[in-house]
Image: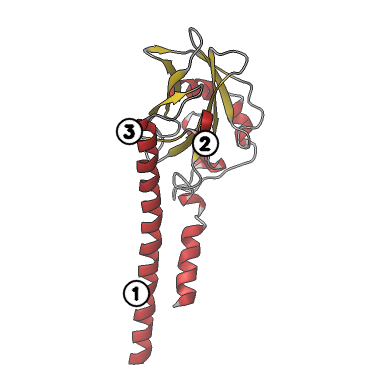
């Protein structure tokens, strides 16, 4: 029984390529104001898993569609990040899926040159009409591919939030502030949902292993 349980546990803990997204490592986002230019908000995005980049590349038409197999597995190649990073389609996708607002006004963004997309991520500088102390940042990266994708975000003074489908906008204090109640509440709720999903998966595997062990034991007794 112990062997069966450990084998089942390993199957969940080490997902196959077909199950690596969107429930693998989450995307990460960092938000900060430029120290030299208080009118610029810098947002850095980093993908959770390299196979997610391949999925995005296929979605943007930058990689051949057969790189996603019929069973959902992804044929990731080390050249994929460079192909995606060099594309104007990717830059346009970033600017469409990540937006920064200073009140009712959207701040236009410029994507910085990307040199190591999979390892370092991509950075966008948003220029607002004037010095900004608080902004609203929306992140919708990859949720058009699957609404289950999440992005873990950090900001000044330890602010944190979880972005997800239906919860894609948060307010951030850029100078001497704390996270808003909405951001803190969203973080707790979203994190709880993800933890519950993982724990539920472990329980289902454990129950399945227990049932299999009992069935094998009964067969042994009958034999």
Q: CA distance from mark 2 to mark 1?
A: 39 Å
Q: Which label's residue is closer to the chain start, 3 or 2? A: 2
Residue tagged by mark 3? 166
x and y, in percent, of residue 167 in the image:
35, 33
Q: Nearer the viewer, residue 138 or 189?
A: 189
Dot 1: few (<14), some (14–19), or many (≥20) neighbours within 10 Å? few
Q: Which label's residue is closer to the chain start, 1 or 3? A: 3
Q: CA distance from mark 1 to mark 3?
A: 38 Å
Is 68 drawn above or below residue 159 in the view shown?
Answer: below
Q: Kindly state the secondary structure of the residue where label 3 is placed.
A: loop
Residue tagged by mark 1? 211
x and y, in percent, of residue 213 in the image:
39, 78
The residue depicted at 47 percent of the width and 76 percent of the height is 2
Q: Which label's residue is closer to the chain start, 2 or 1? A: 2
Q: Nearer the viewer, residue 193 or 131?
A: 131
| Left or right: where 193 falls relative to 60 | left
x and y, in percent, of residue 85 in the image:
60, 27
Residue tagged by mark 2? 28
Q: Name the quarter where the N terminus is drawn.
A: bottom left
Labels 1, 3: front one: 3
The residue depicted at 47 percent of the width and 50 percent of the height is 18
Labels 2, 1: front one: 2
x and y, in percent, of residue 191 in the image:
40, 44
Q: Nearer the viewer, residue 196 or 144?
A: 196
| Left or right: where 205 falls relative to 133 | left
The residue depicted at 39 percent of the width and 71 percent of the height is 209
Q: Nearer the viewer, residue 182 or 157?
A: 157
Q: CA distance from mark 3 to mark 2?
A: 18 Å
């Amino acid at each position: 029984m112990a062997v069966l349980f450990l084998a089942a546990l390993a199957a969940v803990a080490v997902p196959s390529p077909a199950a690596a997204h969107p429930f693998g490592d989450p995307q990460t986002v960092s938000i900060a104001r430029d120290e030299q230019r208080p009118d610029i908000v810098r947002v850095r995005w980093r993908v959770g898993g390299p196979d997610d980049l391949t999925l995005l590349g296929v979605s943007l038409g930058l990689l051949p569609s057969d790189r996603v197999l019929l069973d959902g597995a992804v044929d990731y190649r080390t050249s994929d990040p460079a192909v995606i990073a060099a594309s104007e389609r990717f830059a346009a996708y970033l600017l469409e899926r990540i937006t920064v607002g200073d009140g009712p006004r959207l701040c236009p963004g410029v994507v910085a040159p990307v040199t190591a997309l999979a390892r370092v991520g991509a950075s966008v500088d948003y220029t607002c009409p004037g010095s900004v102390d608080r902004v609203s940042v929306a992140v919708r990266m990859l949720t058009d591919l699957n609404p289950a994708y999440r992005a873990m975000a950090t900001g000044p003074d330890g602010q944190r939030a979880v972005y997800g489908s239906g919860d894609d906008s948060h307010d951030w204090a850029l100078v001497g502030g704390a996270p808003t109640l909405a951001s803190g509440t969203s973080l707790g709720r979203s994190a709880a949902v993800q933890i519950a999903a993982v724990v539920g998966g472990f329980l289902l595997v454990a129950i399945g292993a227990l049932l299999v062990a009992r069935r094998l034991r009964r067969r042994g007794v009958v034999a």
